[in-house]
């Protein structure tokens, strides 16, 4: 087997492990999300990711490889971090912000991985392989953009107003000097 194929197989095995772990991570995110727009986004990317796993398997076949037991340690770390944050918070506005933060970290990792593979496949003249992986790359970028949209339109404003609402509950109603006065001095 030539060196290019060997390297490509290694990259693809890593991506295969990454996608499978991402599927499990997204299932947990879906359970913990409150925003309907966020849930829809995760749900549709779960469906996309199932196809992406198949694409990686197809790509491996094209270069003469098999998925194997390789574990993507980077994705493992990203998922662990997401799980820790989810377990430390209750469902609601903060949780939704944390889920988007974690999901976008995952998407960015995947964009980097597929970006490299597509570029490499093109350089080797493997255009079919580049096209196949390019589809996944486009989906990862699209998902990242959708997550940004959900953050901007819904999740961040909900979190900000929730956080500010809690601040206001802390203030004494009679205290007009919000910025200056400590409660003790009122
Ligand atoms: Fe993804």
Image (spheres, rainbow, N blue to C red):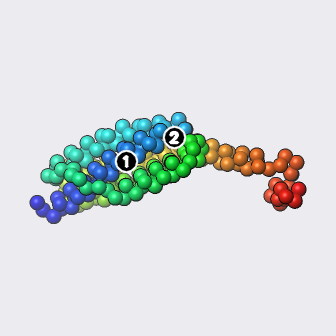
On whether ligand 1 comes within 8 Å of the CB at mark 2, the answer is no
Residue at point 83% right, 49% down?
A: 172
Q: Which mark is on residue 33?
A: 2
Quarter of the image for the C terminus: give it.
bottom right
Residue, far bottom: 3
The answer to which image quadrant residue 74 occupies is bottom left
Q: Earlier in the sequence, mark 1 or mark 2?
A: 1
Alpha carbon separation for disc pair 1 and 2: 16 Å
Residue 61: tell me if it is visible. Answer: yes
Task: Mark 1 and mark 2 in contact? Answer it, CB < 8 Å.
Answer: no
- Residue drawn 87% across and 59% down? 185
Q: Residues within 10 Å of mark 2 (few under 14, many from 20)?
A: many
Give x and y (percent) for residue 52.
30, 44
Left or right of residue 161, residue 123 in this image: left
User: Is ligand 1 less than 8 Å from the beta carbon at label 1?
Assistant: yes
Residue 154 rendering spot, x and y as whole percentages: 58, 41
Q: Horizontal and vertical percent for residue 103?
A: 45, 49
Give me the disc on residue 101: none
Mark identifier at residue 22: 1
Q: Which residue is drawn at 53% across and 43% down?
A: 150
Element at label 2: loop
């Amino acid at each position: 087997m030539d060196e290019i194929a060997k390297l490509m197989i290694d990259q693809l095995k890593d991506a295969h492990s990454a996608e499978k772990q991402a599927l499990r991570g997204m299932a947990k995110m879906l359970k913990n999300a409150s925003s309907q727009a966020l849930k829809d986004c995760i749900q549709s990317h779960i469906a996309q990711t199932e196809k992406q796993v198949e694409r990686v398997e197809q790509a491996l076949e094209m270069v003469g490889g098999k998925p194997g037991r390789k574990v993507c340690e980077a994705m493992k770390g990203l998922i662990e971090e997401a799980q820790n944050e989810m377990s430390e918070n209750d469902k609601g506005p903060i949780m939704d912000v944390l889920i988007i933060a974690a999901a976008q970290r995952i998407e960015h990792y995947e964009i980097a991985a597929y970006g490299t593979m597509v570029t490499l496949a093109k350089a080797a003249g493997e255009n079919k392989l580049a096209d196949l992986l390019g589809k996944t790359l486009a989906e990862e970028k699209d998902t990242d953009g959708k997550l940004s949209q959900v953050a901007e339109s819904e999740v961040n404003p909900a979190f900000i107003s929730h956080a500010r609402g809690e601040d206001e509950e802390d203030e004494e109603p009679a205290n007009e000097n919000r910025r200056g006065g400590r409660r003790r001095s009122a």
